[in-house]
Structures are given as C-alpha cells and as structure tokens.
Amino acid sequence: MTKNSIICIGSVLWDVIGRTDTAMALGDDVAGRITRIPGGVALNIAIGLAAYGMQPVLLTMIGRDAEGADLLAFCEKRGMNCDHVFRSSEWPTDHYMAIEAQGQVMAAIADAHGLEAAGAQILAPLEYGPLADAAAPYQGVVALDGNLTEALLAYIADAPAFQAADLRIAPASPGKATRLCPLLHHPMASLYVNRREACLIAGQAPDLSATEAADALIAAGAARVIVTDGAGLTVDAKAGAETVTGTPPQVTAARATGAGDRFMAAHIAAETGGASRQEAQIFALNEAAAYVAGKD
C-alpha cells in the first residue's frame, strides 16, 4: 500500500457492449458494433483512478478461467494491485451486456453471480490482514459498488473494519439502488447516485429535481450525497455544510456505459489531491463529459 492507494470493492468483469448510431425501439434489429472490454463498476472506477495517478487495490472475485486470466492481466498492466483478488474455481468470471443507441443505454443485463456467491470472502484482506484488521481498521478511501448483495452491504455498514474508512459508494444500477439503504447512516459515507437512484433510495417520487433528491437523502440520514442528472444539474449536498452545484459541459454523446464511474473516479482523485468540493465537482464534470464524447 502507498499513500496513493485506494481500495476498490465490487464488480470486475467483462463488458459486452453493442453500439449503434440508429434510433432503436423494442424488437429492432439494427447494424452496429459489438465490443468486449474490461468493465464493472469497481473496475471502471479503478481504471479512472489509475489514469489520475492513483494505485487502485482491487477486492473482488475473478474466476479461474481463461477470461479471468485475461482480465487479471489487463488490471495488472494498468498498474492495479491485484494481490488480494479472490479467485474462484467454482464460479466463472462475471459479465455485463448492454445495448446503446445514439449514446443512450437501451437495455442491460448484469451477470454478477460469482461476485454475489463469493460474498464476504472478498473482504478478508481488510478484516483479517494484510490490508487492515480489527485492531487497526482501514482509514483511507474505499470505493464501493452496489453489485454486492444487500446482506453484504448491510454488513459493511456496521462492520468495525469499515467504520473509520472514507466510503465512496456507487449503486450498480437503479434496479440495485435500494441495496445501499443500510449505508445511509454510515458516518463517513459519500453516495454517488443519479437523480433516479437518489429518489429510489430516499423512497420518494421519481419526479424530484436533483436538488430535492439530494435534500431528501440528507434528511434520511446520509452524511453526503453527489447527485447527477445527465446533462442537467449536479448537486453535492453535505450534512451541515453548504450545497455545491454545477452543470456539465454540453457534448455529443458517443457512449454512455461507465460515464458515472468516470465522474466518481475523477471526483475522488481531485479531492484526494486536495481540491475543494467545488473544484472537484468541476473537474469531475469535465472529465465525465470528455468520456461521454469518446475521449479517453
């Protein structure tokens, strides 16, 4: 571990993405491009962090199969610490499949059964060493994604090993957003959510503005929330502090999958480097916009 190390917990898998410039409706069969690239919320965040000079430490499950070996090689080549990855012979490496049309996700399926089956085994290096243990809990930044089971996320919310950690949390999707509810009361948790996810976690109607959704989460007990709304307003609300807002630059969308993860990585890297909340938000919005426009 180095001073630039950040622990990333969650999904590390293969993304299979079909992209087309043609508008699509249910049942359409159109021409486009299909690619397979390394992905998963935790890995997308780790890729971004590595690009900003950080050293991600991965805590995840990767299968002992050919796809797992390729994925691990990719991570190591990008400078990630993979020494503590849980390898499984029972479960294959996980996958995510999405269809994007004109820069918008039309549908997606996440197969994270291996990660879910591994459960708390992926956390062992933080609870029993060598990264930390009960006598010396981890006190750095932990990027955590909502692909973990609801039971495991609830465990993390109260586990002594995580009480001193600076938790940065992202839901895997709106469908899994409510899994994060137990983490609302963690004293050092920052939730990175879009407006729809924020409404779901807060138990509110889906038509709230980003500001209203952020306020609802703070009222529900969250210490800090960063709510994005596509090309609309981004809101950073913190209990007992001034709310920070900003609007992303307008770009032509070339891709959508992973944009929120890039925003989160840029935001964490900026704040870790000493940026103010306003400075970190501006940097993250610009970086996410560049990513959506197809720039790496």
Image (spheres, rainbow, N blue to C red):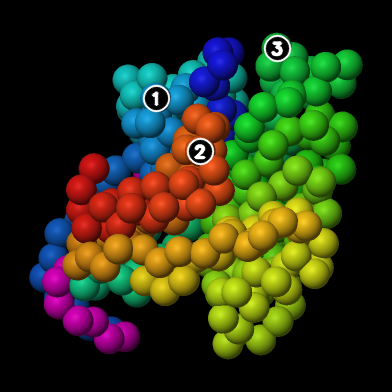
Mark 3 / mark 2, whichever is N-terminal = 3
Which stretch is magenta? 14-26
Q: Nearer the viewer, residue 176 or 141?
A: 141
Res. 72 visible in picture: no
Three-letter residue code for mark 2: Ala
Q: Is 51 on the left-hand or right-hand side of 167?
A: left
Nearer to us: label 3 or label 2: 2
Q: To which residue does mark 2 refer? A: 275
Question: Alpha-carbon neighbours of circle 3 within 10 Å: few (<14), some, or many (≥20)?
Answer: few
Dot 1 and dot 3 residues touching (CB under 8 Å): no
Secondary structure at badge 3 equals loop
Residue 194: x percent and y percent?
A: 53, 66
> 78 above or below 237?
above
Q: Residue at x 13, y 65 (%)?
A: 32
Secondary structure at badge 1 equals loop
Q: Residue at x 78, y 57 (%)?
A: 240
Kindly identify which numbered label has been placed on residue 53. 1
Q: Nearer the viewer, residue 182 or 93?
A: 182
Three-letter residue code for mark 1: Gly
Separation of marks 1 and 2 at Cα, in angstroms:
15 Å
Whether residue 3 appears in magenta in the rendering, the answer is no
Q: Quadrant location of the N terminus?
A: top right
Kindly identify which numbered label has been placed on residue 130. 3
Whether residue 22 appears in magenta in the rendering, the answer is yes
Residue 60: x percent and y percent?
A: 57, 33
